[in-house]
Image (tube, rainbow, N blue to C red):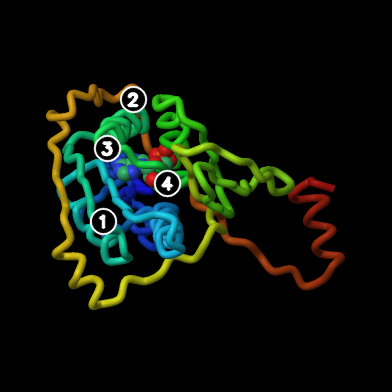
Amino acid sequence: MKILVAVKRVLDYNVKARVKADKSGVDLSNVKMSMNPFDEIAVEEALRISEAGKADEVVAVSLGVSQAQETLRTAMAMGADRGILVESDAELQPLAVAKLLKHVIEKEQPDLVLLGKQAIDDDSNQTGQMLAALMDWPQATFASKVEVGEGKAQVTREIDGGLETIEVTLPAVITTDLRLNEPRYAKLPNIMKAKKKPLDVIPVADTGVDVTPRLEVLEVNEPQARSAGIKVSSVDELVDKLKNEAKVI
Ligand code: AMP
């Protein structure tokens, strides 16, 4: 069995996003970029399936700028066998990403495709679902447990108010939720080994996929600053403020 894992290069989750002066987007100059956290979980899950003897190859795929090769090297340092970058300097929206992943899937013929449930930069939560629709494959989103069997997988999903377990036939698309696993850290010797693993770069123009953006960003704004709170000295003062200032009781 072959597993394909989609890994996106995003603004590191510890970095505070700064909006560009012209409000056209988030300023990504000179900031730390990392693998999307949900994609780290997807890589970890692929590796665990492989280590359990249920898969023989884990291929990491990224779509975007040349520097996304670093993200692929991280996936390979964690344990992925090889990487594929579909290189594009243009912004790639979820539909374009899904179409490009379809292109890679048609070449690679994986039995399972793992993605994060969402990318923490655009928060779209669309790519996995669009990919499953384009492939006409079953999908299991928001996975908190994955058990791969003969030609099928049982997936426990986090839904409102509980957990749902479904079975999908393979090939299928699975998207990962936060509680699926805790991703491993890449060890130094594995970081060194990853430098020698194969990484194919495919120019987006060679795929023949139309990646024209379908959505236009009108404006990006910082969240409104919250005003500072105050300390009250007694319950009576609190009740008075809630009644007469906030007028909520
Ligand atoms: P989104 O639909 O943008 O929230 O992204 C959901 C998931 O799709 C991510 O967690 C990734 O696994 C995958 N994905 C989205 N964009 C890319 C990209 N440019 N390269 C690789 N994977 C991506």
Q: Name the residue under label 4.
A: 114
* Amino acid identity at mark 2: Glu
Rendered image: mark on residue 216: 2
- Callout 4: SS: strand
Rendered image: mark on residue 22: 3
**x and y percentages locating residue 133 in the rendered image:** 45, 26
* Amino acid identity at mark 1: Thr
Rendered image: mark on residue 71: 1
**Where 93 sits versus 50, above or below?**
above
- Callout 2: SS: loop
Check mark 1 vs ligand 1: CB closer than 8 Å? yes or no.
no
Q: In this view, does 122 lie to the left or right of 165?
A: left
**Where 224 sits versus 95, above or below?**
below
- Callout 1: SS: helix
Check mark 3 vs ligand 1: CB closer than 8 Å? yes or no.
no
Q: Is residue 120 in view from this perspective?
A: yes
**Where 218 sits versus 196, above or below?**
above
Real-space CA distance between mark 1 and mark 2, rounded to the nearest whole angstrom: 27 Å
Q: Which of marks 4 and 1 is in front?
A: 4
* Amino acid identity at mark 4: Leu
* Amino acid identity at mark 3: Asp
